[in-house]
Image (cartoon, helix red, strand yellow):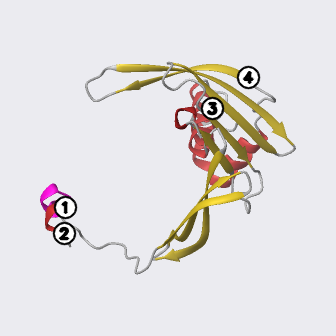
């Protein structure tokens, strides 16, 4: 299973730091490495094939109370692409929740992800989110048209289309704009 780009960058940076601290690489080497070099080093790194692993996720709330989740994860290399699927094993209220990801190597192709929630007892309905229009506004990529479709098999049961207009950035909202008083007051 591929890690996120941040995790990859962290692994490469850590490797460089260890090499420098052990005297394997000269201190100036780290300064000479640019972003492209980091990406190339990461791509060349062996990330293993066809992995199975058990994991424990610990969620800690604001009071410091932990909640534990047991997870089994599988991953497979399919050409240059990576497929992964994971299932929650415990506790019982989330057991059999699953998450499937197709991580495509092609930068022009969006990754696919599916989430299965057995508690909904729907096993036969799927929801698909599709970004139909993506615009660059003030240098920021914004999904300006999205479609959420609920299907049972090939039959569309419901579709929601969300169109964003008049998107602006950098307008100060003020802290009192995000209060229950403002909610009651309205626009």
CA gap between label 3 and label 1 equals 50 Å
User: In this image, 44 relative to 141: left or right?
Assistant: right
Q: Is residue 179 above or below residue 120?
A: below
Nearest-to-viewer mark from 4 and 2: 2
Q: Is residue 89 above or below residue 98?
A: above
Q: Quadrant of residue 116?
A: top right
CA gap between label 1 and label 4 equals 48 Å
CA gap between label 3 and label 4 equals 25 Å
Callout 2: 10 Å neighbours few (<14), some, many (20+)? few
Specify whether residue 8 is in view: yes
User: At 25% across and 25% down in the image, what residue appears?
Assistant: 63
Q: Which residue is mark 4?
A: 52
Marks 4 and 2: CB-CB under 8 Å? no
Q: Which residue is mark 3?
A: 15
Specify whether residue 46 is in view: no
Marks 2 and 1: CB-CB under 8 Å? yes
- SS class, disc 3: helix
Residue 122 image point, x, y percent: 59, 41
Marks 3 and 1: CB-CB under 8 Å? no
Q: Quadrant of residue 18?
A: top right
Residue 171 image point, x, y percent: 28, 73
Q: Which residue is mark 1?
A: 183
Marks 3 and 1, the one that precedes in the sequence: 3
User: At 28% across and 30% down in the image, what residue appears?
Assistant: 62
Find the magenta span and give its range: 176-183
Marks 3 and 2, the one that precedes in the sequence: 3
Marks 1 and 4, the one that precedes in the sequence: 4
């Amino acid at each position: 299973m591929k890690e996120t780009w941040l995790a990859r960058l962290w692994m490469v940076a850590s490797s460089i730091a260890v090499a420098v601290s052990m005297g394997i690489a000269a201190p100036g080497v780290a300064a000479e490495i640019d972003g492209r070099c980091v990406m190339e080093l990461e791509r060349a790194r062996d990330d293993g094939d066809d992995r199975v692993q058990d994991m424990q996720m610990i969620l800690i709330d604001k009071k410091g109370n932990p909640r534990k989740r047991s997870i089994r994860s599988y991953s497979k290399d399919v050409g240059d692409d990576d497929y992964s699927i994971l299932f929650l094993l415990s506790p019982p209220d989330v057991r059999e929740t699953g998450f499937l990801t197709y991580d495509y190597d092609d930068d022009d192709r969006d990754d696919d992800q599916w989430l299965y929630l057995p508690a909904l007892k729907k096993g036969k309905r799927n929801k698909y989110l599709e970004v139909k229009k993506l615009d660059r506004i003030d240098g920021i990529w914004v999904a300006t048209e999205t479609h959420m479709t609920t299907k049972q098999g090939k039959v569309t049961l419901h579709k929601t289309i969300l169109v964003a207009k008049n998107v602006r950035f950098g307008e100060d909202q003020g802290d009192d704009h995000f209060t229950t008083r403002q909610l009651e007051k309205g626009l």
